[in-house]
Image (cartoon, helix red, strand yellow):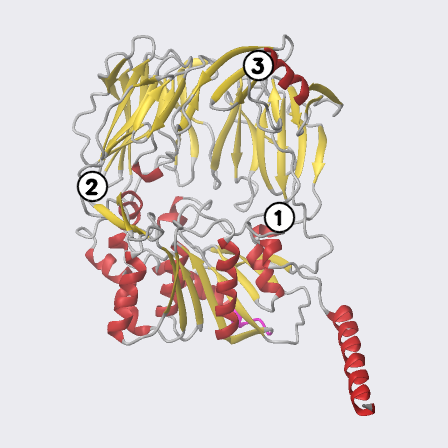
Amino acid sequence: MKKTLSNLTSALLLALLTVGHATAQTPNKPTLEDLIPGGTSYRYTESIYGLQWWGDVCIMPAADSLFTVDPKNGEKKLLVTREAVNAGLTQAGESAKLPQLYNVQTPWSGRTQLLMTLQGNYVVYDWKTNSVVSKRAFPRQAANRDYNLESGNLAYTIGNNLYVNDRQITDEPQGVVCGQSVHRNEFGINKGTFWSPKGTLLAFYRMDESMVTEYPLVDITARVGKLNNVRYPMVGMTSHKVTVGIYNPATEKTVYLNAGDPTDRYFTNIAWAPDQKSIYLIELNRDQNHAKLCQYNAETGEPMGVLFEETHPKYVEPQHPIVFLPWDSSRFIYQSQRDGFNHLYIYNTQGKLLKQLTQGAWLVQDILGFDTAKKELYIASTEVSPLQTNVYKVNVANGKRTLMGNNEGVHRAQLSGSCSYLIDSYSTPTVPRSINLLNTRNGRSVNLLTAEDPYKGFDMPTVEVGTIKAADDSTDLYYRITRPADFDPSKKYPVMVYVYGGPHAQMITAGYRYGAGGYHIYMANRGYIVFSLDNRGSSNRGLEFENCTFRHLGIKEGEDQVRGVEFLKSLPYVDAKRIGVHGWSFGGHMTTALMLRYPDLFKVGVAGGPVIDWAYYEVMYGERYMDTPQANPEGYKECNLNNLAGKLQGDLLLIHDDHDDTCVPQHTLSFIKACVDARTYPDLFIYPGHKHNVSGRDRVHLHEKITRYFDDNL
């Protein structure tokens, strides 16, 4: 008995000492649940939701109240309460109630009216008279809703057909889709309906994909797996045919643009003339190297002419519709990369180039709005740095640019009705979010929010950026390196290279923590050096930087990533024998390619949703960057990773979603078969029910799975 008590006392003392030691020594590091969207304790950066303009008055919603904020001094006043709005709705005979005010809009300057969606209705409510001004109903199954603020007309889709207000305006069989985005969301297309300036005419896409090969996906939630066919035009194969219709709600008539045979043609970037009499679009050939700005009569659909054309030996990629100057309906702005960077050009309606408005070794990212009184426009650009987005005011007459706000970070702006003020929301490497009301005339600002780090109090990694030379020995490439919070330069650390590398993406920015994501933070604190490099082929560096990879995707990108690894190996705290790589989609292709082409450098890889063989990818993206398999057989052979399956030496995990209709499962499955044939041994994990990434609660599981693979093998 005495011996037992002695043993028990020793065990208790040991436990207490262990607890005390753990309390003193265990770092306070955020978990995957804290860092990954979908986590039970995921931490968001504080923001002001629903912040908007009512003319030149700022509107700040809260759950139960709407406030006005004077942009001159930041003075805040109550405008209306949710209780008062709901009482007014009840008085007007509405049974539905607003649960909160974050989603209401104040889109009409000078009108005391709110726009809200309420139980299947767009409701316009006047808070001054406590009355419902108008109501426009939509069915529960309505998708792609497009409500016009000028006319109150509403377009939406049900299934594959288009409706306007309560009328079905198309009646198409399966295989023909109306009123939705076309060309697989390429060319800046993200919708399928386009209201005229007064909202009295509607242009819409009609896509006939009945001739496109169906790709089989399987829903395994049914007892007997259910076939789900999607139309997926692969490179070099028969593509869909798109036409553009114009519907008049007053006459209930539709005309289609007489553009001729739509076979192997892309109709992009739809824009209306200010007088609504004509419509403009940028047509592109299937080779995507010849663009035409075309004008059509909106009443008859007949062509009115080609204003001008643009060609390039590699590709032309229109991303923005033309924009008319609001003070001169005879002039418009066209965006082009013709001088190597995306810039603004002013044309007249006869197609004559009047001037290049912006120029330089930087690019315009977006047009934000116009100050009609001063004949100025506002743009977002990379003029300060390719890592930044800053807002500039541009004088249309002389091209003079004036920086709005500070010259740091990544900015988003929302202009007031007269453009006298803007909501300037930005982040910098050290500021998670700052929201300010900025006077565009004198530059004075009123701060509404400076958010604290949502991970304040945790032990966080250090993040820094720098540049190295690309494999061409002349081009500067930006890298980001994330080190553990308890980093010890005398130790040797394993490395996780996180890669994307493809077009239209940039990983290193001047935003908070230089764009390092939650998983990078987690892996760094787990004892890894996390490294990312924006290789040639990625975005915001100009046309030559991007299109140098044409017809050979993954080759130059891989060479640049190897330069990044060579830089890592020069660091005394990097264990050169323990370097792994991870990426998704194009990054999955890069991960697999790096493991196969450079087996001596990379020991472990996790490739998510990878492109393996570009011959299995879709027409628009695939042919733009790779041409067709018929025209570029050597390029397709060189970039087909199935041909390299026998070179796998390290540990490679492929992860794919069984409903992936962007990068279809055939990529991963074909690679597994190629490895079986070559007697190499990758690993495979499938996420059922997800498309081209893993979202929601399962996203935490995904990153735990990746972490375990790196921990077990690296």
Secondary structure under the numbered disc 1 in the rendered image? helix
- Toward the viewer: 436 or 306? 436
User: Mark 1 is on which residue type?
Assistant: Tyr
Name the spot of residue 605 as percent of width and height, x first.
43, 67
Q: Relative to 705, is 371 above or below?
A: above
In the picture, the disc for residue 512 is: 1
- The range drawn in magenta is 568-572
Secondary structure under the numbered disc 3 in the rendered image? strand
User: Mark 3 is on which residue type?
Assistant: Tyr
According to the picture, the residue beneath numbered tag 2 turns out to be: 212
Location of the N terminus (image quadrant): bottom right
Observer-side mark, 2 or 3, equals 3
Characterize the magenta stretch by its predominant secondary structure.
loop
Name the spot of residue 52 as percent of width and height, x first.
60, 25
Q: Are marks 1 and 2 in contact (CB under 8 Å)?
A: no
Left or right? Give the position of 216 relative to 434: left
Q: Relative to 289, is 52 above or below?
A: above
According to the picture, the residue beneath numbered tag 3 turns out to be: 125
Q: Tell whether position 357 is magenta.
A: no
Specify which label sits upstream in the sequence, 2 or 3. 3
Q: CA distance from mark 2 to mark 3?
A: 46 Å
Q: Is residue 204 visible?
A: yes
Left or right? Give the position of 370 relative to 334: right
The residue sitting at 69% across, 18% down in the picture is: 79
Q: Is residue 351 visible?
A: no
